[in-house]
Amino acid sequence: MRIIRGLGGVWAYVRKAPGTYVWLGILFVTTVALHHMSPEFEEHFLRRRSTNILELSRNPVRVLVASAMWIGSGHWVPYAFLYTVFHAPAERWLGTARWLAVCVLAHVLASLISEGVLLEAIRRGVVPYTAVNTLDIGVSYALAGVMAVLVYRIAAPWRYAYLLAVLAVFGLPLVTGPTFTDVGHAVAGLIGLACHPLVRGRGKAWNPKETLAGHRG
């Protein structure tokens, strides 16, 4: 009976974050597909779905959508954990529409801005022209945006500790030799923080102290 109740609790949790787990299901299917490709074909296949400068100049809408459906590393389990820890709570809190708005804004704007930074570096001769076809695929920009917007889910003073952690995760790489993807993650984090208008009216902020007190009681 405990197992049945536990499974029922898991299903109830998943059901309240449908977008998160449908997306995660798509990523599972596409990850399995990648494992059945040869390394040479996989690289060519992902580049066609990459938000690099070349593909964005050809069909920006197609690659912006397609790039969010694949995991470049081919490792699905870590993302299942991250989606459950960050995406699912954000969707349950904001509602599917607002959560999706944060994801789309972070993914699209961070992709465009980071590739714009790369294009400027190419024009200045800092990086070679071949960088227009750099592989840039995955879901990390949307994840960064959601991680940042969750700052508003946490009550003070815990909020400020979480904010510092987010700023450190996405800000420190900019100091220690940044890549264009580091720029993209930082931009996505700032976009998440800028989504404060979307969190208005979404209920009382979560207080970890109250949760711990409830468990002890």
Image (cartoon, helix red, strand yellow):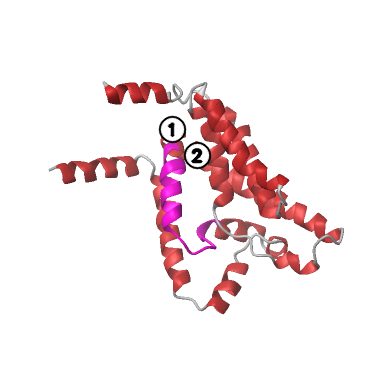
Percent from the top left, x then y, of residue 204?
44, 21
The amino acid type found where label 2 is placed reads Trp
Q: Earlier in the sequence, mark 1 or mark 2?
A: 1
Q: Is residue 14 left or right of residue 201?
A: left
Identify the residue shown where x is 54% and y is 73%.
42
Residue 207 visible in the snapshot: yes
Q: Which residue is mark 2?
A: 99
**Residue 88 magenta-highlighted:** yes
Quadrant where the C terminus sits is top left
Quadrant assignment, res 106 = top right
Label 2 element class:
helix
Q: Which residue is mark 1?
A: 93
CA gap between label 1 and label 2 equals: 8 Å
Percent from the top left, x then y, of residue 143?
53, 46
Magenta highlight: main SS: helix
The amino acid type found where label 1 is placed reads Trp
Percent from the top left, x then y, of residue 66?
56, 60
Identify the residue shown where x is 41% and y is 45%.
84
Quadrant where the N terminus sits is top left
Identify the residue shown where x is 51% and y is 60%.
71
Percent from the top left, x then y, of residue 197?
58, 28
Label 2 crowd (10 A; few <14 / some 14-19 / many >=20) = many
Up the image or down, 89 lies above or below 184; here it is: above
Quadrant assignment, res 105 = top right
Looking at this view, is 35 or 15 the one in front?
35
Identify the residue shown where x is 44% and y is 59%.
76
Q: Which mark is residue 11?
A: none
Residue farthest toward the right in the current orientation of the protein: 124
Q: Which residues are magenta?
A: 68-89
Up the image or down, 51 lies above or below 164; here it is: below
Label 1 crowd (10 A; few <14 / some 14-19 / many >=20) = some
**Residue 143 magenta-highlighted:** no
